[in-house]
Structure formats: C-alpha cells, structure tokens
Amino acid sequence: MVPTSYYILLSAALFILGVLGVLLRRNAIVVFMSVELMLNAANLALVAFARQRLSVDGQVLVFFVITVAAAEVAVGLALLVAIFRTKQTADVDEVSTLRG
Amino acid sequence: MDFILFGVTAAIALIGAVAMLLSRNAVHSALFLLMNFGAIAVLFLLLQSPFLFTIQLTVYAGAIMVLFLFVVMLLGAEQVEATPDRIAWQRPLSLLLGLGLLGVAVVAALRGEMAAAPPGGEAALNFGDPAQLGALLFTKYLLPFEITGVILLIAVVGVVVLNQRGRQKA
C-alpha cells in the first residue's frame, strides 16, 4: 500500500494550485473552477485518512462535501450568469460596484 | 504495482491542475479540470472507496463539469483576460504566499504519523463496502443526510429565482 503521507502531499499540492488559481486568474469562471479543485484536494485527504484509520466516517463526510459542492456550483454559476447579464463581463476586477 | 498506479495517476492529476491554471481559454481549463477529476476518481478507487469513485465520476466529472462548460459557452466568456492586470503587485505576492502555504502544508504532512503504510489484512478486506457506507448514512448520519436534501432544494429554488427575467420591481 502507498503510505498516507504521499496522498496528503498530493492533496496539499493540488490545494495550493487551487489557491494560486483563485489569486492569479481574473476570469470568474476559472476562479470558480479553482475553488472546485481545492474542494477535491480536501476530499482526497479525507479519503486517505479514512483508509489510514479504516473508518468509513471519512467517506461519508466526502459524500456530503460532494453534495454541497453540487448545490454550490449551481447557485454560483447562476450568480455568474446574473452578473454577466448586468455587467457584460466575467472579469472579477470589473465587478467593483461595492468599492467606495 | 500500487506505487506505479499512484505515481501515474498523481502525475496526471497534477498536470491537469497546472494546465487548468495556465490555459488562457476557459473551455480548455474546464477540460483539463475534467482530466484532474478523473485522476482523483482513480485515486479514490486506489484508496478502497468504489462508491466515492462512482459519485466523483457522475456528479463531478458528469454533472458539475457539464454545467461549467454550458455556462462558459453560453456567456462566451472564454477569454476575458486580454486587458493588463489592474493590480500588478498581486501576482508576485500571490506566488510568494502560495509557495509559503505549500511549505507549511508539506511540513504538516510530513510531521504526522502517517509515514507508515496503512493497515491491511482482515479488517481492511471489507473496508469501503458501499453497503457499509449506506448503513452509516441512514443511521448515524441521518440528520445531516436529510439536511443535504434541504440544501439541494434551496439551491434549486435559488437558481430559479436568480435567473428569472422580467419581474424586476417597478
């Protein structure tokens, strides 16, 4: 079996890539995809720990994370479409109406 | 055998993530992310969770990515980053902070006691059985399970409300 730490390292690397995606990209849709990447990295760590401890509870938690992520994507993309309809752009720098 | 499979799948996952980050076209980003999700699904299978493998493929790679592609193509927002960055100092700072976070994460991952191989043998044999997971979902985690139903309902209502046209307040 592959040691759990390998999975955790891979998960950390994927999470950092997601963080960089959120910080560097300005296309709101790509930023959103990066958030999904981070959720997936966390899921991978949870499943790895569940295997390490032989406890199915971790897998149940991942199931819940995936369900909530599906709801979150639906609402988030609806928000993006609404923003695009009023602003005609998906650039996160352009959406600064709340700035004083 | 396990190590080879893990290495190849991990490499595919990392390549997918980096390519998603770097590609200029949002459709390409979505497809690379799809590749990453597929690789993570295979890793779930390696970690003895066939149920999550299926869920990952149907919900993430199937439903969520199709939704992403639909929205990208509907909006025509493939390339919105043609203009120069307004906050120029953000880029080096975020790279620096990202590397710092990676360092902390690697230290945290290596300090734990999970360097040893996970247990095998009798107990591991029937671990990750979907029936086991289902039983847990309907006994110990019954209330959270029902709450997810409410969350999904609220999401459906929210999407419909957010996207209805022509009912603005006069």
Image (cartoon, coloured by chain):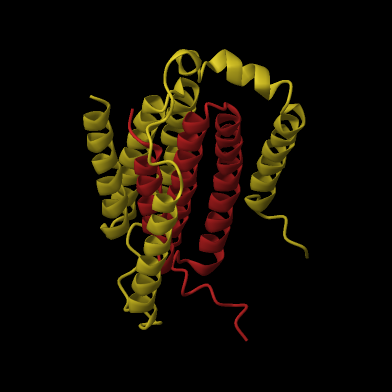
Chain colours: A red, B yellow
Residue drawn at (48%, 34%) of the image: A47
Residue drawn at (41%, 28%) of the image: B47
User: Picture coordinates of residue A77 (x, y %)?
Assistant: 53, 51
Figure quadrant of the N terminus of chain B: top left
Figure quadrant of the C terminus of chain B: bottom right
User: Picture coordinates of residue A8 (x, y %)?
Assistant: 41, 45
The answer to whether residue B154 is left or right of residue A95 is right
The answer to whether residue A25 is left or right of residue A65 is left
Residue drawn at (71%, 21%) of the image: B138
The answer to whether residue A100 is left or right of residue B71 is right
**For the view shown, which residue lies furthest in the bottom direction?**
A100
Is residue B77 at all visible to an observer of this figure?
A: no
Is residue B40 at all visible to an observer of this figure?
A: yes
Decide which of B117, B26 is in the foreground and name it. B117
Decide which of B65, B20 is in the foreground and name it. B20
Q: Total of numbered circles in the picture?
A: 0
Residue drawn at (64%, 46%) of the image: B159
Which image quadrant for residue A70? top right
Instruction: Look at the picture and state if A24 lies above or below B140.
Output: below
Decide which of A51, A19 is in the foreground and name it. A51
Which image quadrant for residue B46? top left
User: Picture coordinates of residue B158 (x, y %)?
Assistant: 69, 47
Which image quadrant for residue B90? bottom left
Instruction: Look at the picture and state if B63 lies above or below B92.
Output: above
User: Picture coordinates of residue A14 (x, y %)?
Assistant: 37, 50
